[in-house]
C-alpha cells in the first residue's frame, strides 16, 4: 500500500509503514524509507496517472521487480489523509 | 482555546526554537497566517526549506526517575505526506529555562503512531496526544518506543559557518 499526498505542484508518495516493514523487515536500514515526489509545472490531478506510471512508482519505492510485487498481491494507492483508494492493481 | 498564558509560553517556545536555527546558521520566518506550520527554516545559499511545528511543554509530570510531558498534534497533520517535510520540535521548559528539545520528523512520528500504537487518538477533536518520558540526561521514551535519538537531533540542519562580512 502506498500513501499519496496531494500538493499544488504534484504528488508525494510513501510506502505505508506496514508495507514497508513487510518488504524491508523490522530492522531495515532507514535509508530505504523514501518519499518520492513527482512535480508538475501546471496544476496536477491524480487522473493524469495511468497504469504504467503507478507501477513505476511502486518499483522505485519497494525496490522490488514487478513479478515479486504481483506475488505479494499487487498494490494499492490511498490518500494519506482520507484513506480513500485512488488506484488499485488487479 | 488555549489561555492567554499558554499563548505567551507557546510563542516563547517558538522563538527559542527559532534561536536554535539562527545559531546553526539558518534563516527563519514565521508564516503570516498560522495554519499548521510555526516556523519556516531556510538555508540561504540554496533556498532549501524546512517546515517546523513547535510544541511547548512546561507542565511536567514527575516520575520516580525523571519526568514526562504530553503534546498534541492534529491527526491530519500527522498523516499527511507533504514536501518539504515537516518536523516537530518539542521544547521542554524546566526551572525557568529551556532544557531539552526533541526533534522528530513528521514521517517518523507518523510511522511510530501507525505501527506501534503510540499516542492517544481523540476522534472528537481529530487530534493525537503523545507522552514523552525523560530518564536521566539522555533517555527519552514515547510509550514503549525509544526516542532518545531524537533528543537535540538537529542533524538535518548541520552547522553553517558563514564567512565574515568584508570590511
Image: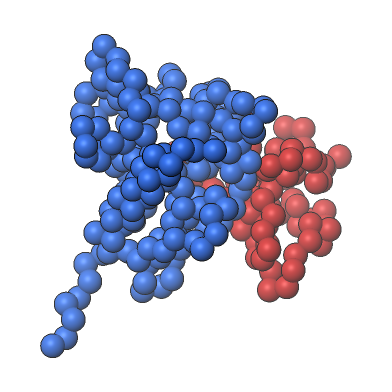
Chain colours: A red, B blue
| Image side of residue B66 versus residue A13, left or right | left
Percent position (x, y) of residue B103? 37, 42
Q: Residue at x 69, y 48 (%)?
A: A4
Compared to A54, does B122 lie above or below? above
Horizontal and vertical percent position of residue B107: 52, 42
Q: Residue at x 79, y 61 (%)?
A: A45
Q: Position of residue B115 (x, y in %)?
A: 56, 27
Asked where in the image residue B132 lies, by quadrant, the reply is top left
Q: Position of residue B39 (x, y in %)?
A: 43, 56
Look at the picture and state if B40 lies above or below B105.
below
Taking the spot 22% from the left edge, 39% from the top edge, the residue there is B97
- Drawn side of residue B25 relative to residue A38, left or right: left
Quarter holding the C terminus of chain A?
A: top right
Toward the left, the furthest residue is B167
Residue lying at the far front of the rendered structure: B4
Q: In percent of the image, x 41 and y 63: which residue is there?
A: B29
Compared across the picture, whether B7 is left or right of A2 comes to left
Q: Quadrant of the N terminus of chain A?
A: top right
Residue B94 seen in the figure: yes
Can residue A17 be seen here? no
Residue nearest the observer in this picture, A34 or B64: B64
Amino acid at each position: 500500500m502506498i500513501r499519496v499526498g496531494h500538493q499544488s505542484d504534484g504528488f508525494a508518495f510513501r510506502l505505508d509503514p506496514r508495507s514497508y516493514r513487510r518488504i524491508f523487515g523490522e530492522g531495515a536500514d532507514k535509508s530505504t524509507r523514501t518519499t518520492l515526489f513527482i512535480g508538475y509545472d501546471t496544476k496536477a490531478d491524480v487522473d493524469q496517472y495511468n497504469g504504467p506510471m503507478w507501477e513505476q512508482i511502486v518499483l522505485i519505492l519497494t525496490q522490488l521487480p514487478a513479478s515479486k510485487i504481483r506475488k505479494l498481491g499487487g498494490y494499492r494507492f490511498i490518500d494519506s489523509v482520507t484513506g480513500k483508494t485512488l488506484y488499485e492493481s488487479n | 482555546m488555549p489561555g492567554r498564558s499558554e499563548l505567551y509560553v507557546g510563542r516563547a517556545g517558538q522563538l527559542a526554537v527559532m534561536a536554535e536555527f539562527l545559531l546553526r546558521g539558518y534563516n527563519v520566518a514565521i508564516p503570516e497566517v498560522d495554519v499548521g506550520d510555526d516556523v519556516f527554516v531556510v538555508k540561504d545559499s540554496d533556498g532549501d526549506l524546512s517546515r517546523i511545528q513547535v510544541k511547548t511543554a512546561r507542565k511536567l509530570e514527575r516520575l520516580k526517575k525523571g519526568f514526562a510531558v504530553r503534546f498534541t498534534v492534529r491527526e491530519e497533520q500527522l498523516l499527511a505526506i507533504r514536501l518539504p517535510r515537516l518536523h516537530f520540535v518539542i521544547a521542554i521548559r524546566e526551572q525557568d529555562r529551556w532544557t531539552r528539545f526533541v526533534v522528530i520528523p513528521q514521517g517518523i512520528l507518523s510511522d511510530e503512531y501507525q505501527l506501534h500504537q503510540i499516542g492517544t487518538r481523540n476522534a472528537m477533536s481529530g487530534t493525537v496526544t503523545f507522552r514523552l518520558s525523560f530518564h536521566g540526561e539522555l533517555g527519552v521514551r514515547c510509550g514503549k518506543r525509544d526516542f532518545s535519538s531524537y533528543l537535540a537531533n538537529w542533524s538535518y540542519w548541520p552547522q553553517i559557518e558563514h564567512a565574515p562580512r568584508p570590511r
